[in-house]
Image (cartoon, rainbow, N blue to C red):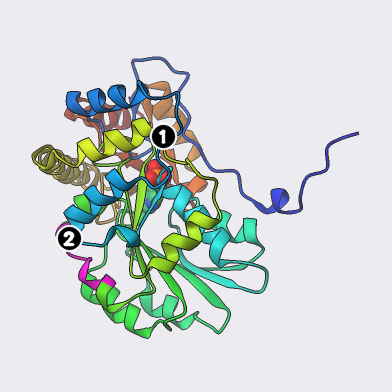
Amino acid sequence: MALEFAEKTRRIPVYPVAAGYSLGPDVAMLASNEATFGPLEPVVEAARHAILGANRYPDPSYLPLRRALADRYGVPWERIALGTGSCDLLLAAGEALLEPGAELVYAWPAFSIYPHLAAASGARAIQVPLTGEAAHDLEAIAAEVTVATRLILVCNPNNPTGTALPLEDIEAFLQRVPDQVCVILDEAYVEFSLTVGDPFASLPLLERHPNLVILRTFSKVYGLAGLRVGYGLCGSESFRVAVDQVRQPFYLSGAAQAAAVEALRYQDEVERRVVATVAARTTVTEALRARGHWVAESDANFVWVRLAEDGDDAPVVAALRERGVVVRAGSALGGPGFVRVTLGTDAENERFLSALDAL
Ligand SMILES: Cc1ncc(COP(=O)(O)O)c(C=O)c1O
């Protein structure tokens, strides 16, 4: 007899993970928007030191990391939610806020985990198409808010398109959202955004909008994707309490926590990575446009380019992979015909462009 699983397992989409892990070392992995920069030596050392105490569960209050983030961003630690990556916080938000009869609104294409929230909870998802420039249409999102709406997800800069909206637009949007509706502003790539400016720019919104959660991660510019640490800066403490209630305790390992605290100390390095990424973004975008391809205006560490006019991106993705370049097919992310390319080292970016030329 086959096992019988819950109805929701038929609804939950399979997360489109990157291919290429089995291709060996000589591969340009440009599929998951990770940092090309490895962790700094003191960060590795902090994690190593924490592992020496791995016979104990980690302190479930995570106060050292909460306090480090509170010091940096000026948000009280009681209003800082943590997670095993920001994905964990998104899923916990779905569990805490959604149920059958409730509604969730977000732009599409956006981050590929978002559809999971409604599928897991039985809530209704309203996906609002991006504009012709592949940006969020906040007007159309606001128009979808009903009495049933519990949660709105705004991804700024947006994954997979890289587009970002100025904070004035976000603020005007927030003013239209009823107080009881939670808005998660997913800023996983905010450090790379010239439109937003810097990672402090959106923080004043929290004081004016208690229903807002600004979601961040150590998986991108901080280069700790393998350790998974995400955080939410919350307009009110109730969000943090609710997402902690629906999850198991000890979700963040001591090593992950220690590495994140240490990584925050090296803001010069963050700045250096941002400068290098922005330069690579300009180079790759211009190179693709010079070859006649449409490229969205990216504010992130990746570009979104149309490479298959007929919408069939599989052949180009496969051909690039044969040349050792792993990128993400747009069809897996809600944008058939497009390809999302993470910016790598100069050599990796050059390898991608040469492989494209060879097709
Ligand atoms: C927009 C966005 N939000 C959140 C995440 C989740 O990152 P993590 O769970 O590693 O913090 C990602 C990862 O790709 C992302 O693109």
Q: Is residue 347 visible?
A: yes
Say which element carries label 1: loop
Mark 2 Cβ and ligand 1 under 8 Å apart: no
Q: Is residue 118 above or below residue 140?
A: above
SS for callout 2: loop
- Against 64, residue 7 (above or below) is below
Give the percent coordinates (x, y) of residue 274. 15, 43
Res 130 → quadrant: bottom left
Residue named by callout 1: 253
Is 272 situated left or right of 53 in this image? left
Residue 161, percent from left and from top: 35, 54
Q: Amino acid at mark 1?
A: Ser
Depth check, front residue: 274 or 335: 274
| Quadrant, the C terminus | top left
Marks 2,1: beta carbons within 8 A:
no
Rendered residue at 17%/29% (across/down): 346
Outermost residue to the right: 1
Provide the residue span drawn in magenta: 197-206
The residue under label 2 is which amino acid type?
A: Phe
Rendered location of residue 166, percent (x, y): 22, 69
Q: Residue at x 44, y 71 (%)?
A: 182
Q: Is residue 316 left or right of residue 282?
A: right
Residue 205: say if magenta: yes
Looking at the image, tell me whether mark 2 or mark 1 is earlier in sequence order. 2
Instruction: Characterize the magenta stretch by its predominant secondary structure.
Output: loop
Q: Distance from label 2 to label 1 (Cα)?
A: 27 Å
Q: Which mark is residue 200?
A: 2
Tell me where residue 78 sits by quadrant: bottom left
Front residue (pair 72, 354): 72
